[in-house]
């Protein structure tokens, strides 16, 4: 069963997500954990020409992975920190376009979790992707 992530989605705890046009709309614990969102880049997310900077992609990709891992962890366990993150940008994102975001857990060990996230455009083409390793905090039994 997935942990209820409702209070963390949207601007609940991470107002930057909403400010750059992201809106998380789902999460689950099946398969280790996942999270999904939509993204309509705002002016804040873009340079003066309307194109999204790489760091903005990274905010959303990192959040998707964090929410995915946390939704699949039991009890009071949670992510503690991002240990490593690698992002790739295959296509430009721009204002006025609509994107989908998905984060999925790849593997969870005692102290570390590995996950990946992707941003796709309305045609389903991959725009950017990320893999990351997170340090976990395990609550004492």
Image (spheres, rainbow, N blue to C red):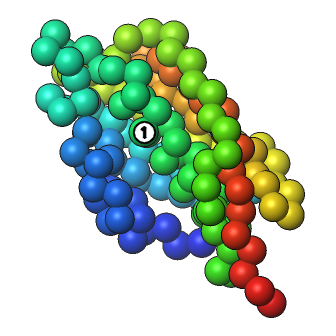
Q: Is residue 90 left or right of residue 110?
A: left
Tag count in the figure? 1
Percent across and percent down for residue 40 are 26, 32
Percent across and percent down for residue 1 are 68, 72
Where's the C terminus, which quadrant? bottom right
* Residue sitting at the far right: 109
Mark 1 neighbour class, 10 Å CA radius: few under 14, some 14 to 19, many 20 or more: some
Tell me what residue is drawn at x 36 percent, y 31 percent: 56
Q: Quadrant of residue 106?
A: top right
Percent across and percent down for residue 86 are 63, 28
Q: Is residue 69 above or below residue 103?
A: below
Tell me what residue is drawn at x 77 percent, y 86 percent: 140
Residue placed under numbered mark 1 in the picture? 59
Q: Is residue 87 left or right of residue 77?
A: left
Q: Is residue 61 left or right of residue 105?
A: left
Tell me what residue is drawn at x 48 percent, y 55 percent: 26
Residue 121 shows in the view: yes
SS for callout 1? helix
Q: Quadrant of residue 2?
A: bottom right
Q: Quadrant of residue 91?
A: top left
Q: Is residue 121 above or below residue 68?
A: above
């Amino acid at each position: 069963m997935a942990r209820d992530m409702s209070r963390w989605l949207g601007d609940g705890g991470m107002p930057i997500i909403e400010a750059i046009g992201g809106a998380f709309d789902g999460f689950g614990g099946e398969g280790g954990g996942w999270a999904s969102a939509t993204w309509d880049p705002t002016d804040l997310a873009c340079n003066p020409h309307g194109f999204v900077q790489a760091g903005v992609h990274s905010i959303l990709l990192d959040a998707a992975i964090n929410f995915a891992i946390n939704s699949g962890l039991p009890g009071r366990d949670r992510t503690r920190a991002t240990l490593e993150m690698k992002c790739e940008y295959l296509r430009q994102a721009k204002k006025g376009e609509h994107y989908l975001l998905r984060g999925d857990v790849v593997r969870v060990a005692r102290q570390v979790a590995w996950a990946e996230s992707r941003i796709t455009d309305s045609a389903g083409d991959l725009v950017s992707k990320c893999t990351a390793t997170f340090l976990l905090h395990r609550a004492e039994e």
